[in-house]
Image (cartoon, grey):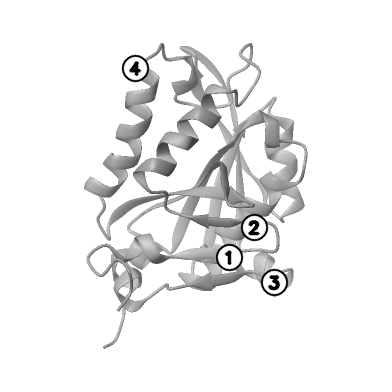
Amino acid sequence: MVPHPYWPLFDVRVRTPRLEIRLPTDDEQNELVAVSDRGIHDPAAMPFTTPWTDRPLPDRHRETLQYWWGARASWSPHDWRFPAAVFVDGRPVGVQELMATEFGPLRSVKTGSWLGREYQGQGIGKEMRSAILHLAFDGLGAREALSGAFFDNEPSMATSRSLGYVFNGEELLLRRGKPDRMINLRLDRDTWSATRRDDIVIEDLSEDCLEMFGVPVVR
């Protein structure tokens, strides 16, 4: 029997030579809050459309935990968020999220992430994106992966370009209450397949998990 028969998503693991991604436990969520407290980005900049890192304490701590709990509570095969923690040498260092609406018929996913500043500049950002893309394309059978970054977030866009994403238009979104340019990016299945890695492993993605992600399963 798998360790989590009633919520099998807790058993899903994606491993690369450098890191592991999986859903965090409540205690590991607390560790991730501590990582975010030590800083994610320059306070003068804001990479997120929802400026959660600006929130005062203790509100930010409580709302961060509520976000993870909310992902579990609201999960549906038609609309889901998989906010995986990123572990390097057994320590949580950030979050790599995969999300989709009506994934079954559309096979389209979006990604979002953050990484503690102390772990940036070491190639971890690209590695964790590679891991979640492997789950999306190889594990779930996605057709496309979408991402985006504000026009001045060059590190994020450089990571996307290095993995084969291409420009997919732009739009105006609010950043700290003011309109700013969001650059949209897209990676299709054929492009991912051309450079897919053979050193990334998905563990315990069971039929029950696939059904929760909205992937049709013939039993």
Residue of label 1: 134
Please name the residue shown 53% across and 71% down the image. Answer: 202
* Circle 4 or circle 1, nearest the eye: 4
Residue 17 lies, with reference to residue 116, above or below; the image says below
Picture quadrant where residue 210 is located: bottom left
Sequence order check: which comes first, mark 4 or mark 1?
4
Q: Is residue 208 left or right of residue 12?
A: left
Residue under the point 33% across and 52% down: 80
Eye-nearest disc, 3 or 1: 3
Quarter of the image for residue 26 reads top left
In the rendering, at what x and y percent does residue 212 appear? 29, 65
Residue shown at 68% from the left, 65% from the top: 191
Residue 63 marker = none
Q: Nearer the viewer, residue 103 or 18?
A: 18
Q: Label 4 is placed on what type of residue?
A: Asp
> Mark 4 or mark 2, which is nearer the start of the sequence?
4
Q: Can you give x and y, in whole percent of width and height, for residue 28 in the image?
A: 43, 43
Residue 12 spot, x, y in % from top left: 43, 65
Residue of label 2: 130
**Dot 2 surroundings within 10 Å: few (below 14), some, or many (20 or more)?**
many
Q: Amino acid at mark 2?
A: Ser
Q: CA distance from mark 3 to mark 4?
A: 40 Å
User: Within 10 Å of the Cα at label 4, are there few (<14), some (14-19), or many (20+) other Cα atoms?
Assistant: few
Judge from the rendering whether residue 4 lies leftward or rightward of residue 23; answer left or right: left
| Amino acid found under the numbered disc labelled 3 | Asp
Q: CA distance from mark 2 to mark 4?
A: 32 Å
Amino acid type, residue under disc 1 in the picture: His
Q: Which mark is residue 199?
A: 3
Q: Regarding mark 1 in the picture, which secondary structure is present there? A: helix
Q: Nearer the viewer, residue 90 or 48?
A: 90
Query: On the image, numbered disc 4 is attached to which residue?
Result: 59
Check contact, mark 1 vs mark 2: CB within 8 A.
Answer: yes
